[in-house]
Amino acid sequence: DADVTQTPRNRITKTGKRIMLECSQTKGHDRMYWYRQDPGLGLRLIYYSFDVKDINKGEISDGYSVSRQAQAKFSLSLESAIPNQTALYFCATSDWGTAGVETQYFGPGTRLLVL
Amino acid sequence: GESVGLHLPTLSVQEGDNSIINCAYSNSASDYFIWYKQESGKGPQFIIDIRSNMDKRQGQRVTVLLNKTVKHLSLQIAATQPGDSAVYFCPGDYKLSFGAGTTVTVRA
C-alpha cells in the first residue's frame, strides 16, 4: 500500500464550486505539504503544516485553505474554484533521516480541472 | 531569498550515454541538497542527497557533485536507461518551490 495517498485522483468541477482534496499518510510524519504543479512552472508550495496545531501559508495560498484533522490527514479546499486553479496537486510528507537530511515523500497527485 | 535553478529545461540523451543535469543555488547556508526525480504520472521521488561538507556522493548509477565556490550542483547519471526519462528537481532547503526542473528524454 502507498504511504501517501490522495483522493480523488481526478476531479472535474465547475467555476464557483467548493471542493476538497484529501491526503492521508501512514508514514507517521509530522510535517505535511500541499503543492500545485503547472506546466513550465514546476511545483509551488500552497500550504504546509509542521504538526497538527501548526498551519503555514506557502508561496501561493490565495484561494485555498487547509485543515489538519490529525497527524495522518491534511486536506486542501478550494472555497470557490476558478479555471486558473486547474492543475496537478501533490501532497507530501517529510522526515528528518538519521543523516540529518529532511526528505519529502509525495503522493500520486490529484488532477483537477475547473470548467 | 534563496533560489535554485536548473541550467537547461530539457536534455535529450542517447541510451547508454552519461547524463549531466546542472543546478545553481544562491543560499550558501544550505546544509544539504537533494535531487528528486518525477516520472510521468507520478509524484517526485528522492534520488540522492549530499551534505554541504561534501564534494561528491555516489549512489547506484548516480553521482552528485557539489561546488560550493561557484554554488553549483550537478547530477550525473551513468549509462542512461529509458527508465531515467523524467523531470529532475533540486529544490532548496525550505521546499518553497521546486522550480520547473529539467526534463530528461532518453533516445533509443
Image (cartoon, coloured by chain):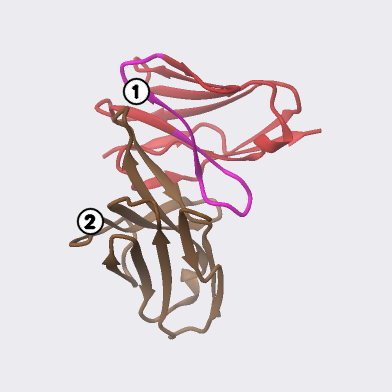
Chain colours: A brown, B red
Quadrant assignment, res A77: bottom left
Across and down, in percent, residue A5 comes to 48, 61
Q: Residue at x 72, y 21 (%)?
A: B17
Residue B59 is one of the magenta-drawn residues: no
Number of the label disc, if any, that sits on residue B51: 1
Residue identifier under label 2 = A51
Whether discs 2 and 1 lie on one chain: the answer is no
Answer few, some or many: residues within 10 Å of disc 2's Cα (few below 14, many 20 plus, some between 14 and 19).
some
Does residue A85 lie above or below A101 as drawn? Answer: below
The part of the chain drawn in magenta is B35-55
Q: Amino acid at mark 2?
A: Asp
Does residue B29 lie above or below A77 as drawn? Answer: above
Q: Residue at x 61, y 46 (%)?
A: B39
Give the chain of mark 1: B
The C terminus of chain A - image quarter: bottom right
Q: Residue at x 46, y 70 (%)?
A: A85
Q: Amino acid at mark 1?
A: Arg
Give the chain of mark 2: A
